[in-house]
Amino acid sequence: MDRIPILKVGDCLLVTIQVDMHDELAMSLQEDLTSQIARYGSRGVLIDISSLEIVDSFIGRMLANIAAMSRVLDAQTVLTGMQPAVAITLVELGMALPGIKTALNVERGMQLLQEYMDEGPEPEETDGSEA
Amino acid sequence: MDRIPILKVGDCLLVTIQVDMHDELAMSLQEDLTSQIARYGSRGVLIDISSLEIVDSFIGRMLANIAAMSRVLDAQTVLTGMQPAVAITLVELGMALPGIKTALNVERGMQLLQEYMDEGPEPEETDGSEA
C-alpha cells in the first residue's frame, strides 16, 4: 500500500490512519489531501487516528503540517479518536497540536466541522483596534 | 495494528480496508462490526476498498461473510471504491459478490444506503402467491 485513501463525505474529507507512517507515505498523503481540498473545495478535513496506539514526533509534526496546509486552503482540520495514551505522549513530547481541533469520535468531529462551516471562519485576532 | 477502525457516520458504519487482511484481523473485524451494528442499530455498512490493489478469494469470502452477517442484523452492505483490476479478479475467481451492493465512491455509497433506509428493505421474493 503506497497511498492512504481519502474519502469525500459531504463537504469534508475523511482520512483514517491505520498504518505506520513513513516519510514517503506522509508526503503522498499531504499531496493528495491538498489537491483534493482544492479540487472539491472542501471546508473540512477529518483525520481519525483511533487505531494508532503510538504517536511519535514524526506523526505529530505531520499532523500539524496537514492542519497548517489545510488552513491556508481555508479548510479546518479535526483530529478524532485519539487514545488517552497518545494524548499523554503528545503532550510529553511537547506537541500540544495548536491549531488542530480534536473530537472524541468521527460523529462529533463532523458536528464540529458543520458548526465551523455554518459559522464561517473564526475572526482573526486583531491588535485591539476594535476595542 | 490489530484492529481495523469502524467509524460511525450517521446511521452508517464506515470501514476502510487499507492493510493486508489475515485470519485474525478478519475475525476481529467481523466481531467488531456485528457488535457495533447491534449497539448502534445501524442500518448500513460502507466498506471502502479503494486502496486495495489485489483482492484474493480470502478477502472476497470475508466481504461476502460480512454482508451476510449484516443482512441478518438488518443492515445493508455497500462496497465502495473498487479498482477496475479488482473487479476483473473477483469475477475471474468466480466471486461476483451476490448480495453486496457496490458504488463508485463513498459519497454515492452513502446515497445508496440513504435510499435503502428511506425505502425500507426490499420485499422478499414470494413464490408467486401474490401474482
Image (spheres, coloured by chain):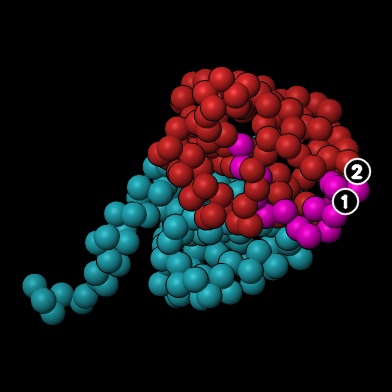
Chain colours: A red, B cyan
Q: Position of residue A24 (x, y in %)?
A: 80, 26
* Point 29% across, 54% down: residue: B115
Chain for disc number 2: A
Quadrant containing the N terminus of chain B in the rendered view: bottom right
Q: Is the residue marked by circle 2 packed among few (<14), some (14-19), or many (20+) residues within 10 Å?
A: few
Measured in 3D between alpha carbons, the distance from the residue under mark 2 to the one under mark 1, in whole angstroms, is 6 Å
Q: Residue at x 54, y 27 (%)?
A: A131
Residue at 32% across / 61% down in the picture? B117
Q: Position of residue B98 (x, y in %)?
A: 43, 58
Which residue is label 1 attached to? Answer: A89
Q: Chain of mark 1?
A: A
* Quadrant of the image occupied by residue A108: bottom right
> What amino acid is at disc 1?
Thr
Q: Residue furthest front?
A: A131
- Report whether A101 appears left or right of A115: right
Q: Residue furthest left?
A: B131
Q: Nearer the viewer, residue A104 or B49?
A: A104
Give the residue pinned by disc 2. A93
Q: Amino acid at mark 2?
A: Leu
Left or right relative to A130: residue A33: right
Q: Is residue B29 above or below residue A109?
A: below
